[in-house]
Image: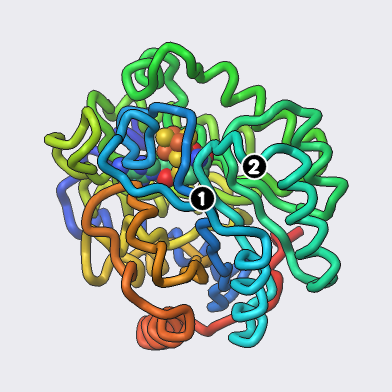
Amino acid sequence: MTDAEILQIIADRDAAALDRLSAAADAARQTHYGKRVFFRGLIEFTNYCKNDCYYCGLRRGNLTLLRYRLPPDEILECCRQGQKLGYNTYVLQGGEDPYFTDERVVEIVAAVRAEFPDCAITLSLGEKSAESYEKFFRAGANRYLLRHETANAEHYAKLHPPAMSLATRMQCLRDLRKIGYAVGAGFMVGTPWQTPANLLEDLRFIEEFQPEMVGIGPFLPQASTPFGDCLPGDLTLTLKMVALARLLVPKALIPATTALGTISAQGRELGLKNGANVVMPNLSPTATRKFYALYDHKICTGDEAAHCRRCIENRIVGAGFTVDMGRGDPAR
Ligand code: SAH
Ligand code: SF4
């Protein structure tokens, strides 16, 4: 696809053209994964963060948020609950919380690995040194989610304080790949100051890097952040990005994100119809869920893990897909 073609798709308001894009993305997904949708059990284990990303409700500057950390035994309890519900992949996600030192993360990963030897362990803990990533990998982690957020350095600088840079982010992604992780990159759609040219850069980056996973969701404002008054990302534009990601990285594992489900009641189903093939239902304890407030109005914050499992299964089947509770490794 040429740059002009991609920019045309971004600008397009013609419904028939969008339908063609969805159909092409759907066909690409079917070639590698059929109708299967993979389940990942998400455990949001800490909402402390030392960073101050302007878009995120967990940023350290948000003094209104009640903070929590799950102790290791509670994290393991979430995994046990997940196993009972049929999960074989756990995603441990959190803010960049200094309390979780390398030693503590290693201990937790090793404990999950020991109790669930065949599961896939995915980490999403932000930027760490290559040495830290390596320790986690040796303890048994297999996958790592670290969205690049925007592939344009100037735009990156508008979304993050000066302490963070696109160069560091990209270095982390390269380190993760070199160590042997299946790597997840990705970006938000509709962040302040984002241009069509930025989205093109995001797509070209994932095309070049060929991440094993690509997370794409709309930006959603969180009231206690500097972007609290900004407009949310657009549903159709987000779906176009999901479909284009599928076409540019045909074998990627692409989630129909919670943020997509938050901007529209049918958002996740539409994501699946536009090339996504992963869902990440929440396994976090209900008591702390609402405090993992990346953005406002996040869905499912009051639901039990068993409820989420059933609800998402019904949505998948209703949209014409099938549930796959296996590890869902990347297609070769
Ligand atoms: N601290 C880790 C993981 C938690 S944040 C990290 O930053 O990688 C996980 C993802 O949530 C981020 O990559 C970002 O893309 C998304 N996110 C954060 N704030 C958001 C918002 N306001 N709207 C939509 N997505 C958001
Ligand atoms: Fe912290 Fe991640 Fe939120 Fe940035 S996006 S403030 S690193 S939790």
Q: Judge from the rendering whether residue 139 lies leftward or rightward of residue 37; answer left or right.
A: right
Q: Judge from the rendering whether residue 172 lies leftward or rightward of residue 194; answer left or right.
A: right
Q: Amino acid at mark 1?
A: Thr
Question: Is residue 56 positioned above or below 297 on the image?
Answer: above
Image quadrant assignment for residue 326: bottom right
Q: Residue at x 26, y 71 (%)?
A: 266
Placement of the C terminus among the 4 image quadrants? bottom right
Query: How are the residues colored?
Result: rainbow
Q: Residue at x 60, y 80 (%)?
A: 81
Who is closer to the viewer here, 153 or 22? Answer: 153
Q: Judge from the rendering whether residue 123 lies leftward or rightward of residue 270; answer left or right.
A: right
Q: Which residue is mark 2?
A: 100
For residue 46, which numbered disc appears in the image? 1
Decide: marks 1, 2 in contact (CB < 8 A)?
A: yes
Q: How many marks?
A: 2
Q: Quadrant of ligand 1?
A: top left
- Relative image position of residue 48 (x, y in whole percent): 47, 41
- Relative image position of residue 37 (x, y in whole percent): 54, 74
Q: Residue at x 24, y 33 (%)?
A: 225
Graded by Cα atoms within 10 Å as few (under 14), some (14 to 19) or many (20 or more), the crowding at tag 1 reads many
Q: Residue at x 42, y 20 (%)?
A: 152
Question: Is residue 71 positioned above or below 9 on the image?
Answer: below
Q: Amino acid at mark 2?
A: Phe
Who is closer to the viewer here, 104 or 284? Answer: 104
Q: Secondary structure at mark 2?
A: loop
